Image (cartoon, helix red, strand yellow):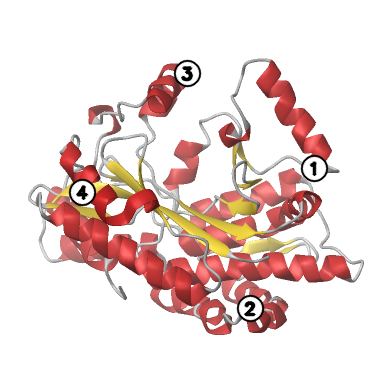
């Protein structure tokens, strides 16, 4: 119970042009595989690479593994004058210039989703938390959906798209929502009901299995975990660990309530979706709705309440420092805030629009390895 595993997706960029590496050499991935084994995977686009930790007993182990993964991919990519960046969109890369990976799964995905799939030049962070009971996973998924916008707000790292500031802190969410079977999860009364719904889609020939449900949180089809998927990938390693620790502790808090015959109130999807939009649009800046109060509350106050809510659980899991470090994100800003600040500073210093975007890529390359 409450083991943790983290998956991150990186974009590969050319150090000379700072543009996406449209067709990196196949030897690069093969070299990563020899070094990292099953912890590295190809992604939908050739310009992407995915890594995953093993099953970690605590956040210190997860941090060490994620740091190793970031270092290894950066070192191997550097042999071809490439670099990974941990951002959910590239500041100026063009989706229509990208090439998808030549594997049966991705060929089928491209054929099925067409232009929607071709726009998927986006990366995310997924956090698995071990829960050893099927019914528990469904029950906690129903309740935990309330907190997903709070985690998205902390993680935002995709303000730019094709060289333009979108005005959103997480444009990745807008792109991903074009796919079917995305967004907040459905509510299910039991694990059996969940399986019946998945089975209906499978029998109709719409999906092969539950891995094609791309909700913001889902019961993993392959592992006994509840997988949080709403977050952007964090340029800073420490931010990723703070958010993963929060997710882990939120689930333990809900489990603790359940053992005491209590539960978190479940609000309608239309209400939680309002907070999801606010997190996507504003990040930390404009607050989220506290539905108990019926009012927008500033994010720093919400985060203080969240940390207090899981304090007992963070102590029990030995990750109180990691949970409390989420306040550092408020002080420094998210990855989206850092990208906008870098872009504005470069323009103020006399850079051209393209040079300012390249400065953002340089900042992301450097931030990728901070703390590793």
Pointer 4 or 1: first along the chain = 4
In depth, the one of 218 and 32 nearer the eye is 32
Pointer 3 or 4: first along the chain = 4
Disc 4 and disc 1: Cα gap in Å? 41 Å
Secondary structure under badge 4?
A: helix
Q: Residues within 10 Å of mark 2 (few under 14, many from 20)?
A: some
Disc 3 and disc 4: Cα gap in Å? 31 Å
Disc 4 and disc 2: Cα gap in Å? 36 Å
Tell me the residue that label 1 is attached to.
191
Q: Could you say where residue 87 lies in the image, as x and y percent from the top left? A: 34, 54
**Extreme residue toward the right, this view:** 261
Pointer 1 or 2: first along the chain = 1
Q: Please give the name of the residue rendered at 43% of the width and 45% of the height, measured from the top-left corner.
A: 171
Side (left or right) of 43 relative to 274? left
Regarding residue 228, the answer to whether it shows in the image is: yes
- Is 253 placed above or below 147 here? below
Residues under numbered marks 3 and 4 in contact, where contact means CB atoms less than 8 Å apart: no
Pointer 3 or 2: first along the chain = 3
Tell me the residue that label 3 is attached to.
112
Disc 3 and disc 2: Cα gap in Å? 43 Å
Secondary structure under badge 3?
A: helix
Disc 1 and disc 3: Cα gap in Å? 28 Å
Q: Quadrant of the C terminus?
A: bottom left
Q: Residues within 10 Å of mark 3 (few under 14, many from 20)?
A: few
Q: Quadrant of the N terminus?
A: bottom right
Disc number lying in front (3 or 2) = 2
Tell me the residue that label 2 is attached to.
317
């Amino acid at each position: 119970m409450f083991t943790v595993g983290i998956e991150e997706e990186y974009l590969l960029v050319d150090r000379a042009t700072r543009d996406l590496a449209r067709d990196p050499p196949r030897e690069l991935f093969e070299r990563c595989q020899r070094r990292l084994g099953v912890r590295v995977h190809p992604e939908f686009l050739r310009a992407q690479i995915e890594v995953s930790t093993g099953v970690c007993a605590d956040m210190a182990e997860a941090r060490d593994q994620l740091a190793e993964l970031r270092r290894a991919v950066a070192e191997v990519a550097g042999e071809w004058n490439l670099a990974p960046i941990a951002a959910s969109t590239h500041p100026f890369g063009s989706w229509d210039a990208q090439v998808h990976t030549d594997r049966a799964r991705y060929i089928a995905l491209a054929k099925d989703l067409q232009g929607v799939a071709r726009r998927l030049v986006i990366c995310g962070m997924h956090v698995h938390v071990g829960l050893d009971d099927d019914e528990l996973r469904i029950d906690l998924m129903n309740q935990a959906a309330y907190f997903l916008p709070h985690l998205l707000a902390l993680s935002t790292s995709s303000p730019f798209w094709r060289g333009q500031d979108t005005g959103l802190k997480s444009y990745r969410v807008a792109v991903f929502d074009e796919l079917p079977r995305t967004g907040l999860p459905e509510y299910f009364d039991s694990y059996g009901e969940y399986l019946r719904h998945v089975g209906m889609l499978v029998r109709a020939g719409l999906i092969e299995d539950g891995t094609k449900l791309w909700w913001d949180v889902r019961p993993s089809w392959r592992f006994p975990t509840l997988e949080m998927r709403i977050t952007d990938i964090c340029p800073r390693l420490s931010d990723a660990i703070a958010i993963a620790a929060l997710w882990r502790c939120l689930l333990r808090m809900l489990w603790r309530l359940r053992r005491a015959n209590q539960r978190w109130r479940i609000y309608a999807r239309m209400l939680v979706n309002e907070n999801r939009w606010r997190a996507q649009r504003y990040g930390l800046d404009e607050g989220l709705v506290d539905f108990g109060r019926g009012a927008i509350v500033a994010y720093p106050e919400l985060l203080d309440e969240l940390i207090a809510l899981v304090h007992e659980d963070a102590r029990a899991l030995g990750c109180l420092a990691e949970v409390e470090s989420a306040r550092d994100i408020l002080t420094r800003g998210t990855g989206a805030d850092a990208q906008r600040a870098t872009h504005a500073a470069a323009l103020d210093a006399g850079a051209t629009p393209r040079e300012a975007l390249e400065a953002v890529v340089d900042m992301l390359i450097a931030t990728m390895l901070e703390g590793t």
